[in-house]
Image (spheres, rainbow, N blue to C red):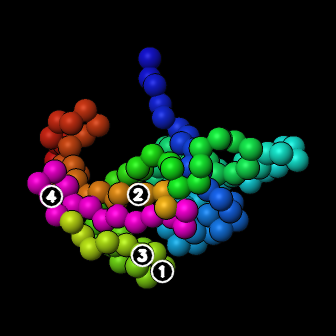
């Protein structure tokens, strides 16, 4: 049986500002923005190529804005990711090179923190972690 993580709630104070940040600055896809009732607004946003989305909105969580889990994206080119975020006006850290990966960090307007990781050698591995055949 597969157990797939497909949606993570990110608490924000201003849904429109957060949606603009994630879509127009970070580059997420805007999948869904509906108000099923006066007290609920559900906005689903997905990073390009990801099977997991984030959800922002109204009436969805009691968590205070900015207290979302530290979230992490994985890319195959950390320099391109850094350049894209910076060009789009995101305050992003310099590239942090560690033995287990290269990282850049940013936060949304409410302070929800994100890491973007490049994993050296991952492109050469298949889904099970074995060397990919050439």
Residue 114 is marked as 2
Residue 30 versus residue 87 in the image, above or below: above
Q: Earlier in the sequence, mark 3 or mark 4?
A: 3
Residue 66 seen in this snapshot: yes
How far is mark 3 from mark 2, CA to CA?
A: 11 Å
Left or right, residue 113 beside residue 96: right
Q: Earlier in the sequence, mark 3 or mark 2?
A: 3
- The quarter holding residue 98 reads bottom left
Report the magenta stretch's main SS. Answer: strand
Residue 17 is marked as none
Q: Position of residue 19 (x, y in %)?
A: 64, 63
- The quarter holding residue 107 reads bottom left
Q: Residue 21 lies in magenta, yes or no?
A: no
Q: Position of residue 32 (x, y in %)?
A: 70, 52
Circle 3 crowding by C-alpha within 10 Å: few under 14, some 14–19, many from 20: some
From which residue to which does the magenta span run? 97-110
Circle 4 crowding by C-alpha within 10 Å: few under 14, some 14–19, many from 20: few
Q: Pointer 3 and pointer 2: residues touching (CB < 8 Å)?
A: no
Q: Which residue: 59% across, 49% down?
A: 64
How far is mark 2 from mark 4, CA to CA?
A: 17 Å
How far is mark 1 from mark 4, CA to CA?
A: 25 Å
Q: Earlier in the sequence, mark 1 or mark 4?
A: 1
Which residue matches tag 1?
89
Which residue matches tag 3?
91
Q: Earlier in the sequence, mark 2 or mark 4?
A: 4
Left or right, residue 25 beside residue 18: left
Residue 120 versus residue 27 in the image, above or below: above
């Amino acid at each position: 049986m597969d157990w797939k993580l497909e949606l993570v709630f990110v608490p924000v104070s201003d849904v429109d500002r957060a949606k603009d940040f994630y879509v127009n600055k970070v580059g997420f896809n805007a999948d869904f923005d509906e108000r099923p009732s006066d007290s609920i607004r559900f906005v689903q946003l997905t990073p390009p190529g990801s099977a997991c989305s984030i959800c922002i909105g109204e009436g969805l969580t009691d968590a205070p804005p900015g207290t979302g889990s530290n979230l992490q994206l994985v890319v195959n080119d950390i320099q391109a990711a850094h350049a894209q975020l910076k060009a789009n006006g995101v305050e992003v850290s310099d590239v942090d090179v560690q033995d287990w990966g290269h990282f850049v960090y940013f936060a949304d307007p409410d302070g929800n923190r994100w890491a973007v990781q490049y994993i050296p050698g991952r492109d050469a591995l298949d889904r099970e972690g074995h060397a990919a055949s050439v």
